[in-house]
Image: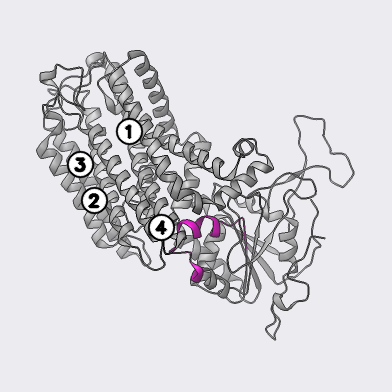
Amino acid sequence: MAQPEKVEIPEKVEIRVHGIGDYGFFHALGDPVVGPPYPGTPTPAGDNALVAVANAPYLPRHRVRLVNWSRANRRNTRRLAWYLAFSFTLLNMAGAMAPEPGRRTRWLSVPLHITAVLLTVGATAWGAVMLETVVSFFPQSALPGDWGAVSIGLSAAVLAGIAIVRRIRASLRPGGEAPPWAVAVLHAAAAAAAAIALALTRPGSLQYAAWPSYSSEPAADRRFDAMPALVVATVLVVLILSAVLVVAGFAAGRRDPAARTPLAAAGAVMVAAVVVQHAVLGLIRAALEIAASFTAALFSMNSFRRPHRTDLLLVIYDDPTTLTDNRLDFLPLHGMLFLLVLLAVLLLSARRRFGPGLLGLLHGTRAGKVWLHRTIEGLPLLLPAALPVAGTVSLLIAGGAIYGLETTRSELLLAVLMLVVTVLASVAVLTFIAKQLQPLRELVGRIGDIAGFWPVRDHPLAGSSYRRPVIDGIQEEISVHDGRQVVLVGHSQGSVICAWLLARQPDPRLDLVTCGSPLASLYRTFFRGRFDDAFFDAVRAGSRTWRNDWRPTDPVGTAVPAAVNEELPDPENGGPVQGHGNYWIDPVQLDYIARLPPEDPEGHGPQDTPGFARMDAK
């Protein structure tokens, strides 16, 4: 890769801010390039399979400062509590998908708050189910008392307490983030109301012979299987609310077609939040059940046989000799099937609209990366029409799977599925509790980096946002270099953070460079109310210059409004396809920053320098 001409400007400081991912400090220096030390010379150890030699990434002559925020953020996103709050964090992100600047229409507010309350009710019920799952392995004589009421009461108290305590702590901390008091009180009341309703109705004791009931018992003794019914009811309600948002989006699209996408996407995120909650908490419950069963057998407690208890509200008798009577075991599979089918239908819709390219993407070819770039750029056209179809197909397939299990009752099939659930539960334990399986944790962490940009507003149990602390840290770093020329370089999510900073805290002496930026492709598309024309104009006005570098092989990096946009060649000089990575060492970007002149005493900036608008690498 050609290196730019080195231009030494001692007073220049470049501050680099990375994007999503679990990166160390040196990530923002770029990847080492494997190859010979000089053009035309052989590569040392070229035939040695155990040794690789590379050139160190290019380091400019001016000072470079590396802002790392992901490692500090991972202290939050690696905790079990953060994974348990993931569905609430998704819902909180959906609340930022307003189609109009400055306000959120009732079409989004009402479905959003209903879904938020359903998530709180679902979490309350799942907390009780987990406690009852463990208690159900003990004879009632060993653990006397109304454990059903204790379980639901304890679950509601914990959730309500967290909601109120977080709100109080935020009010005592300067700049603390928290939803309004009304939202915190609403969800504390929702948890309490769900606990009271379940304790009074005691659904696990209701005589009920139709679906859903435990079919392994005689018809006269069958009881209502409450938790699967609650799961199905909440998913159906949120699907209806999502459909309302899609219709509202098409209605708003009569005036502004771009308004369709944020509402449709908000509906999809709401559905995903509810399905993810039931799938993840169902896996954790399955892991608890497996651990409790082995513990019971180890201490000769019933030898895997679970006694009849009459005091539980949601977990009723589970016959250990059959797999046909516990629907809770298979709820995670139904949830994952729904999400996988949803993703598959969306990818097929993208292939139909934008042509073939999915296989190339899987093989990492340039054509595949260009296809993904075009697909993400075309999401405003794709999603409003594709999401209703994808949701309908997913519901039909998941519903068909439920019907098939309910009618077939094949012990062999159920045994295979139970083995899959056991493996998935083990994966959940290794990922969420034992902190193993780094690729899976990294994937969830990346999603968390996107969702965690938004402060807690719409659900008091959502994961904390990193935005304010990171912006404060960057601002402090900038202030250290008073009197020097500062170039702020943001890659990917780092570009969003930098733009948000300058839109609200302008600094006319600062030069902004964004690269691989999702500002237009994702944030303007899905968070249109926050990233409107006024936002981009404010970023441009809040900086001395704004340059945006992007590649046609970058899935999310595109041209950005109000910036001076530069399309970078990829690959360059026959090298590897870079896609979304290694902007830090791209010769065109390095050359631009190296030649960026300081403002002279008469106020002339780079735009006044002849030939500076575009410079190719030397």
Image coordinates for residue 410, horizontal then vertical, percent:
33, 15
Amino acid of disc 3: Leu
Earlier residue among tags 2 and 1 = 2
Image coordinates for residue 100, horizontal then vertical, percent:
40, 65
Name the residue furthest right: 40
Left or right of 443: which side holds 235? left
Q: Which residue is mark 2?
A: 161
- Tell me the mark number nearer the camera, choosing from 3 and 1: 1
Amino acid of disc 1: Gly
371 lies above or below 362: below
- Cα separation between marks 3 and 1: 19 Å
Earlier residue among tags 4 and 1 = 4
Q: Which residue is mark 4?
A: 97
Q: Which residues are magenta?
A: 514-535
Quadrant assignment, res 518:
bottom right
Q: Is residue 193 visible?
A: yes
Left or right of 263: which side holds 28? right
- Cα separation between marks 4 and 2: 28 Å
Mark 2 neighbour class, 10 Å CA radius: few under 14, some 14 to 19, many 20 or more: some
Decide: marks 4, 2 in contact (CB < 8 A)? Answer: no
Amino acid of disc 2: Gly
Image coordinates for residue 377, horizontal then vertical, percent:
56, 53
Earlier residue among tags 3 and 2 = 3
Earlier residue among tags 4 and 2 = 4
Q: Which mark is residue 154?
A: 3
- Out of 101 and 508, give the one closest to the viewer: 101
Report the quarter where the C terminus lies. bottom right
Quadrant assignment, res 595:
bottom right
- Tell me the mark number nearer the camera, choosing from 4 and 1: 4
Amino acid of disc 4: Met
Q: Which residue is mark 1?
A: 282
Mark 1 neighbour class, 10 Å CA radius: few under 14, some 14 to 19, many 20 or more: many
